[in-house]
Image: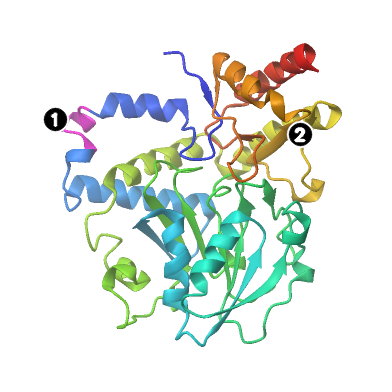
Amino acid sequence: MSRNYNFCAGPAALPNEVLDQLNAEIPDWQGKGLSVMEMSHRSKEFVEIAETAKQDFIDLLEINDDYDVLFIQGGASLQFSMIPMNLLENNKAICSYLDVGQWSKKAIKEAKKFGQVEISASSADLSYKKYPKPDSWKIHPDSIFTHLVLNETIDGVCLRNLDNLPKRNLVADCSSCILSEPLDVTKFSMLYAGAQKNIGPSGLAIIVIKKDLLKEKDSLPAMMQYKTYADSDSMYNTPPTFAWYLSGMVFKWLKKNGGLVNQKNVNESKANKLYSYIDQSDFYINDVEEGSRSIMNIPFLLKEDSLNSKFLEESEGNGLLNLAGHRSVGGMRASIYNGVPEEGVDALIDFMKEFEKNNG
């Protein structure tokens, strides 16, 4: 089956090999006569699926026994609330946040409902075109944790160098960069990611959290406590079984194809090709500071905004889908997650060259 190239920021492209396997398994999973979506989450078959997926995720990121891995419904946006609810003792407690883009702002807004938020660094005055370096962060001495979004999907900025991170209970939103390259989990107290960008379907978030942060809080509903999920192997209630199952298939695909070291090489190759073409062009513009550029989300502007509709119409006609930038910033955006093959980026560049030739 011929498929288009999908550059959507999320829900995003899934690997063709995984989709082929899914297509074969949906009506009859391994001869059981039913699909995974019809299984009891308590059945030995689904428990094995879930445990295998969790272990493969642990293997990919080389997560040690100091951490637990939780599979939680609701995506990353729910974590904007759950993090301060669980980690702050009361609404007088202090937490620090980096303001580096639109998702940072949403996380900050939620945290203010549960504690005292201090802004450690902000790139708002630079229109979020540069990621503040760690040595410039001003973390409040009494902060319980420091929150950062590693990769801002909308503005296409990313903290690329993690060598000099402060040791201050860092909590990181990795939704749009998780599994794109190796990541030293030990630099963080907690990581979280919505699945719908680089993992699997929407409706699932994966949490990597230090076990010493898993404390019961009687003031919170059970479903809002991390300890509830840790104590029940993420099955306190019926989990999003399809998303968990399909995410596990993606983890297997990554391991089969060289793990995160290989994935980093592929992703950097894709990103370098696209940035190189944009930078040598007078027709397209990416105005993110070079050292802060994301290898997952690449926004760009056309020389004239009046050409945007034509660009989108013709790109779609050429099998290049979902290139419109976020409504808050406009322009274009190519999200080139793990599921987007390198030939998809090549096809996009070929189209961009032809469009520039005809409209420049």
Around disc 2, counting alpha carbons within 10 Å, would you say few (fewer than 14), some (14 to 19), or many (20 or more)? many
| Dot 2 amino acid type | Tyr
| Dot 1 amino acid type | Gly
Q: Residue at x 67, y 38 (%)?
A: 298
Asked whether residue 268 appears in the rendered view, the answer is no
Q: Is residue 354 above or below residue 275?
A: above
When asked about the image quadrant of residue 101, the answer is bottom right
Residue 350: x %, y % from top left: 70, 16
Residue 35: x %, y % from top left: 20, 34
Quadrant location of the N terminus in the rendered image: top left
Discs 1, 2 touching: Cβ within 8 Å: no
Q: Residue at x 43, y 38 (%)?
A: 250
The chief SS type of the magenta part is: loop
Residue 54: x %, y % from top left: 38, 53
In the shown orientation, is residue 154 left or right of residue 257?
right
User: How is this picture coloured?
Assistant: rainbow
Q: Residue at x 29, y 42 (%)?
A: 242
In the shown orientation, is residue 168 left or right of residue 276?
left
> Foreground residue, 352 or 276?
352
On residue 33, the disc is 1
Q: Which residue is mark 2?
A: 275
When asked about the image quadrant of residue 329, the answer is top right
On residue 250, the disc is none
Q: Which residues are magenta?
A: 27-36
Q: Is residue 63 above or below residue 176?
A: below
Q: Earlier in the sequence, mark 1 or mark 2?
A: 1
